[in-house]
Amino acid sequence: MLRKLILLFLCIPFLVVAQNKVKVQGLVVNENKEPIANVIVKVQSSNASAKTDSLGQYTLLLSAGNRIVNFKLLGYVFKTIEVKLLIGQNINLETVLRKDVKLLEEVKVEDKVSRNQNMVRFNPKLLGQLPNVSGSFESILKQLPGVSVNNELSSQYSVRGGNFDENLIYINDIEIYKPFLVRNGQQEGLSLINPDMVGNVKFSAGGFSARYGDKMSSVLDVQYKNTDTAKYLIGVGTNGVSATVLSAPGKFKYAFGFRQKQNKFILNSQPVVGIYDPQFYDFQSFLSFDVSKKFSIQTLGIYNTSRFGIIPQSQSTEFGTLQQVLRLKVNYEGQEIDSYNNVVGAVTLNYKPNSNLNLKWINSAFFITEKENFDIYGSYVFDEINKDFDDANFGQVRANRGIGAYQNYGRNQLEVDVYSSEFRALYNHKKSFWEGGFRFQKDAITDRLKEFSLTDSAGFILPNNGPDFQLTESVDTQNQVTAFRYSGFLENTTDFGKFNLTSGLRAYYNTFTNEFIPSPRAILSYKPNPDKDLIYRFSSGLYAQQPFYREMRLFNGSVYQQTKSQKSIHFVASSDYKFKGLGTNLKFSVEAYYKILNDLVPYKIENLRIRYYANQLANGYATGLDMRINGEFIEGLESSFRLSLMKTAEDIVGDSKIVNDANGNQTTIYPGFIKRPTDQRINFSAFFQDKLLKSPTYKVHLNLLYGSALPVGPPKTQRSDDVFKIPAYRRLDFGFSKNILDPNSRHQPKLFKKYLDSFIIYAELFNVLNLNNTVSYLWIADVDNNQYAIPNFLTARQLNVRIIAKF
């Protein structure tokens, strides 16, 4: 009896607390009385919150008294209600949310404009869910049609047969420039695009309108976001940290972002064993001030710095076939220290005298300083390994194929200053929209190049037959280039019933090349049935790419003064269809294209380094088919699948060869059309998300990438000798995530719930299958003077953990 009394007294406090609680059950519906899922229900001045289920229902347990409850869902008008809760009373609420007509109309208009103008819009939040090594914003592009994949360490990408230099990137209408001297993905730091600050994104793989500049392949249009409420975001992981602040006190809105990347763990999985010292930092600010209802000022500031250091020690690489396995073992001396600094400042003045006219004055300055300092000596032994399981010497050296050494030395510095000023006017009149602009740009480039390389393949065995010792490559030069660029465009978009036509003319003049080139472009879209969300498009235009600097520089380091603009004529037929399938909303897109390429500057790609044959010209083509389907296959989680087929080739002018046949007679060979370095015939990618059946708050993220073989050849040879192949790129990354503050989560830590909106833990496994993907080759010869390509592999299997907190 005494025990029961003690137990009763112990339970009294809990019973009293329980009796002070009021159970609130609710239903959220739209104006048609249809339930709405995923509505956030939050009680002011309290930690209590919930999310409506698929039936629009939710449950809250609240203390008695007057309570203010907020209902929030994107696309609906924010609603607040006040309820009076009495002890011992259970409440049933039915709340009606109205659609935010203005917001939905803006979204519909933006979506319509993007689709009519051959642009793909996607949610930038997907990057946070995508398992990827680099963490760069551009990683999400590898899921889009036309984008080729072959390097997970880099933010560089190629589109429909073009190279890295052929892609336009804008942040808030400001053209962005990437590092020029980066040779491999290890050196590459943080992308200039801060994913946490991105609000809207549009991408086109070709056939884009005249408002975008003078590159041959693609355009990525990024707009940073403003917010009406304060938001804070902190990310911590094994590869770095980040912090972002967004707020809007009155007329002043601001966003600040900081990122630090420390991918030492990733680099330690590389074949080269050594001491890695990567230090990558990025600071950004985006400020907006509304001076009046008609006039506003925006500023963008970026300080991006990358320092990469390595003291290599050794490397062991096995390659070959089942019948013949070869091994290269290298011991290193020396070190490498590289730095890449990018400072960006921009000011945009916006003036809107009335609802139909908007004037912009965009001013920007880039200050880029890049330094390379390396002196690395490697001595190697090249062996054939016994892989016969029945042999007692299995795994031992069967035969030595050669010994030798190589040395790479460089003291290079590149300084690039780019100043630009652009005036734009936008005018909307009934069903017609006009946009025009004029831009001035000055480029000032100073390049100090001093480097040499030596590969003494089997040099200890084969004597040097020449009187002088010859370096494989030696460059010692300094260049200064100054160019002024003038460009302008005028574009009109008009609706004609079921048709929409965007047509425009762009033109530019470059003082270095003394070229004036007009660039007409047009996009015609057709929606045959207003009740069916199906659009057909055809676009065409001339895209002329002015040489910046790399296209002008010869292999010996000098500048070729006669370099001209490369040109591409696009023909793109496309369609996209939004429909209901598999119980959700899906979108299927397909594009067929053909590009005529003229006045091309041939090039080789060595890892990420593009080396142009500046004094040569070529004509070529690129053709292919892109298909993609995306949607929420699982409620609340978007997935996508895409397949790209492509072929690109070029015919280099004057690349004929004279060779001797078996009888000693001379024969002239004309190579004709040869594969371009980016001729990757097949690209497939899949980004799939799911929830665990018994624990739906746990999410699974899968990233699958495949890119077929790429052509490659030995150094110091002509492009027509690139008849070898880099094997297909295959990669699978896998991730799990859990938001411990998910409203559907059973256990929510009170301390976290008090201060945070969400707390997401990610666990990711990169390169799940541990496949060796080749990015480039080291070329050596054996004792019989046979040449071998030693593969340089990318990253191996690696575990990554990161945490993202929002408050």
Image: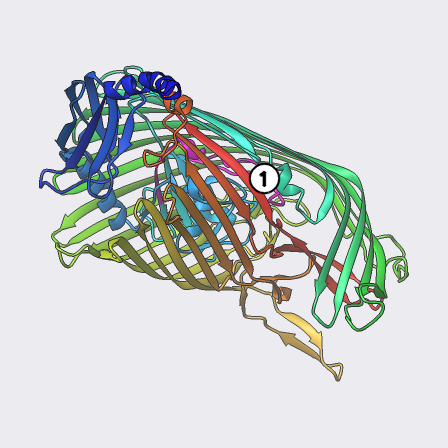
Q: Position of residue 743 (x, y in %)?
A: 32, 33
Above or below, comparing residue 794 to residue 191 in the picture = below
| Among the 4 quarters of the image, the one containing residue 87 | top left
The span shown in magenta is 175-202
- Is residue 673 something that shows in the picture? yes
Q: Position of residue 538 (x, y in %)?
A: 27, 58
Which residue is disc 1 drawn over? 188
Q: In the rendered view of the protein, which quadrant contains the C terminus?
A: top left
Q: Position of residue 665 (x, y in %)?
A: 72, 81
What is the image's colouring? rainbow
Q: Residue 701 in magenta?
A: no
Q: Amino acid at mark 1?
A: Glu
Residue at the left extreme, as displayed: 32
Q: Residue at x 17, y 36 (%)?
A: 428
Above or below, comparing residue 206 to residue 398 in the picture = above
Relative placement, left or right, of 533 versus 222 is: left
Relative placement, left or right, of 41 versus 175 is: left
Query: Along the line of sight, which residue is nearer the eye, 29 or 25?
Result: 25
| Among the 4 quarters of the image, the one containing residue 298 | top left
Q: In the rendered view of the protein, which quadrant contains the N terminus?
A: top left
Label 1 SS: loop
Q: Could you classify mark 1 by the number of other residues whose Cα lies within 10 Å: few (under 14), some (14-19), or many (20 or more)?
A: many
Q: Position of residue 620 (x, y in %)?
A: 47, 63
Relative placement, left or right, of 197 versus 718 is: left
Q: Residue 178 in magenta?
A: yes
- Is residue 286 something that shows in the picture? no
Residue at the bottom extreme, as displayed: 663
